Amino acid sequence: MNPGKRQSIGINRSERNWMLVSLAVLALFAAAVAVGSLVNGFRLPGVHQRVDPRTVASEGEFANPGLREIAPGEYEAYLVSRQFAFEPLEITVPAGSTITFFVTSVDVQHGMKIQGTNFNVQVIPGHISSLTTTFHEPGRYPYICTEFCGLGHAGMFGHVIVEATG
Ligand code: CUA
């Protein structure tokens, strides 16, 4: 044994290097999540509230699905999903509008994705899914069911129509 040599707990050099690489990758992922949420404004769709899927469409806001203007340019949209349609099938707002969607299912699991936006939620019986999106550009934005929910799944879609202002 060489008395001048520093004692170590015996981590092999290449093992140590790979541990450092692993920590660097973790730090990179944490930084990506931080930038996504703080800079780009990415938000996870949340479960807004639990409901009874047998009665949700016959009482409260979902008994009359559709758009409500809560302030100039600010809307809430209540949508009921069922095999094989969204109700309502069309939502029309002026360009620049911000819509907070509340979506629920009365039968099986559906999904809702609005093309051309980052809006994408699971729609689960017994839950209200909620997410907010702003529509800057005029156009037709299809919302489609993203979970296979039965034979009519492929025909389950509607449109957000954003009209030019002025
Ligand atoms: Cu609803 Cu697929």
Image: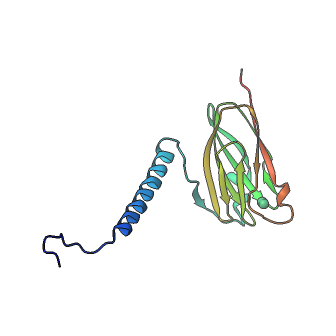
Q: Give the residue drawn at x 70%, y 42%.
A: 116
In the displayed orientation, state which residue is furthest to the bottom.
1
| Residue toward you, 67 or 7 | 7
Q: Among all residues in the image, which is located at the extreme top?
A: 166
Residue at the location (45% across, 49% down)?
34
Residue depicted at 42% across the width and 62% down the height: 22
Residue 128 visible from this viewpoint: yes
Give the left or right position of residue 123, taking residue 18 as reference. Answer: right
- Please identify the residue farthest to the front as the structure is shown: 2
Query: Residue 37, image x and y in percent?
Result: 49, 47
On-image quarter of the C terminus:
top right
User: Which part of the image, by quadrant, shows the N terminus?
Assistant: bottom left
How far from the left and from the top, in percent, is residue 32? 48, 50
Placement of 145 over or under 74, stated as above or below: below
Q: Is residue 7 left or right of residue 20?
A: left
Is 114 rendered above or below residue 18? above
The part of the image, by quadrant, that contains residue 83 is: bottom right
**The image quadrant in which ligand 1 is located:** bottom right
Q: Position of residue 141 (x, y in %)?
A: 75, 41
Q: In the figure, is residue 61 to the left or right of 47? A: right
